[in-house]
């Protein structure tokens, strides 16, 4: 998904739900790029000199690069795989390193139910940066919320906020199981899963991915399957199928266009594979607008 940001108008009815989203976004700041950009509403934009105070919570996930976060209590390093929790009413500022830039996913939300769940988060409010590594569960939460908000279908707020609660639960579970998450193999597998998701349009060599993390391929394939339930190649293929279903349902692109957009060299192979996984051909799926089961 490309960079984007969205600031939402909230109805009184939506506020009654007790937790609602104000802002969301996905951002890639390149090395030496001016930060922050000035195309944000006044209440969100800040200069490094002045910092800012928000009236919402934000959960920011840094997936690449590094930087720093400051509030009146501490100056904290941010690196790849870190969450930054921004609290309403708390002065803060943050920025990426000029040398690395960074990639972030963020969600801003508030409400009395939000207060409750954030209060259960095992994060020091005065030092609200926690390293959890690159984790597919976190990325799936963000991606699902982004897709729901972009479509703005009926009841999108209540559906999206349920995923926020799920995200908070995943963060807490990850913190509790810190010893396991620091395991070198699980960290490598999660980073590779992230690479597979980010390169969904490519035909990746799984041996090269294993070599990148100095893991023997046979052992890597065995442990990846144990960790995810499928081989790396099948996992990547499954991501492609999920994306193909989305494009078939929501875009005007032809089956052939979708085939090549997702890195398949043959439309006939794409159709055979899709039918094997879904039960119908891509053309049939598109024509009849099949219901997509939640992934």
Image (cartoon, helix red, strand yellow):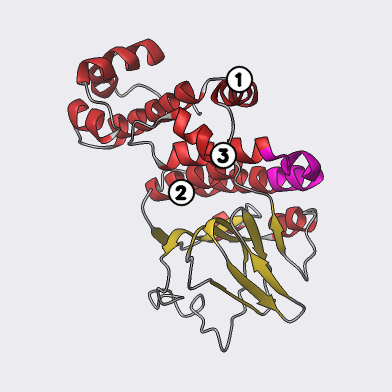
Judge whether 242 appears above or below 179 on screen: above
Q: Which residue is mark 1?
A: 222
Q: Is residue 277 left or right of residue 51?
A: left
Q: Position of residue 165 (x, y in %)?
A: 66, 46
Q: Which residues are magenta?
A: 169-184
Front label number (3 vs 2):
3
- Residue 270 lies in quadrant: top left
Q: Which residue is mark 2?
A: 146
**Residue depicted at x 64% and y 41%:** 187
The Cα atoms of the two marked residues, 2 and 1, are separated by 32 Å
Please report whichever mark, 3 or 2, sits nearer to the chain's N-terminal start: 2
Question: What secondary structure is found at the residue carrying circle 3?
Answer: loop
Q: Magenta stretch: residue 180 in it?
A: yes
The Cα atoms of the two marked residues, 3 and 2, are separated by 30 Å
**Residue depicted at x 56% and y 89%:** 49
Q: Is residue 236 left or right of residue 52?
A: left
Question: What secondary structure is found at the residue carrying circle 1?
Answer: helix
- Nearer to me, 156 or 177: 177
The Cα atoms of the two marked residues, 3 and 1, are separated by 15 Å
Q: Which residue is mark 3?
A: 213
Please report whichever mark, 2 or 1, sits nearer to the chain's N-terminal start: 2
- Nearer to me, 250 or 201: 201
Please report whichever mark, 3 or 1, sits nearer to the chain's N-terminal start: 3
Mark 2: few, some, or many residues within 10 Å (few <14, many ≥20)?
Answer: many
Q: Is residue 106 left or right of residue 131?
A: left
Q: Magenta stretch: residue 118 in it?
A: no
Q: Position of residue 216 (x, y in %)?
A: 58, 27
Q: Position of residue 235 (x, y in %)?
A: 48, 25
């Amino acid at each position: 998904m490309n960079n984007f940001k969205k600031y939402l108008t909230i109805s009184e009815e939506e506020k009654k739900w007790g937790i609602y989203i104000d802002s969301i976004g996905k951002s890639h700041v390149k090395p030496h790029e001016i930060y922050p950009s000035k195309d944000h509403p006044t209440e969100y934009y800040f200069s490094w000199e002045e910092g800012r105070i928000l009236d919402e919570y934000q959960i920011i996930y840094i997936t690449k690069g590094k930087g720093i976060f400051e509030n009146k209590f501490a100056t904290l390093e941010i690196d790849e795989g870190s969450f930054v929790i921004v609290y309403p009413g708390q002065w803060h500022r943050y920025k990426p390193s000029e040398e690395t830039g960074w990639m972030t996913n963020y969600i801003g939300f508030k409400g009395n139910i939000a207060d409750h769940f954030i209060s259960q988060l095992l994060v020091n409010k005065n030092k609200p940066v926690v390293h959890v590594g690159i984790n597919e569960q976190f990325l799936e939460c963000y991606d699902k919320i982004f897709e729901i908000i972009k479509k703005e279908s009926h009841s999108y707020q209540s559906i999206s906020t349920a995923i926020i609660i799920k995200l908070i639960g995943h963060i807490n579970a990850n913190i509790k199981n810190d010893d396991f998450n620091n395991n070198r193999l699980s960290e490598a597998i999660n980073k590779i899963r992230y690479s597979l998701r980010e390169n969904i349009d490519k035909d990746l060599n799984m041996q090269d991915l294993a070599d990148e993390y100095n893991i023997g391929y046979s052992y890597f394939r065995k442990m990846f399957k144990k960790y995810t339930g499928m081989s790396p190649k099948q996992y990547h293929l499954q991501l492609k199928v999920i994306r193909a279903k989305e494009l078939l349902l929501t875009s005007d692109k032809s089956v052939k266009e979708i085939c090549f957009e997702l890195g398949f060299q043959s439309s006939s192979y794409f159709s055979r594979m899709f039918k094997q996984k879904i039960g119908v051909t891509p053309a049939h799926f598109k024509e009849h607008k099949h219901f997509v089961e939640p992934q």
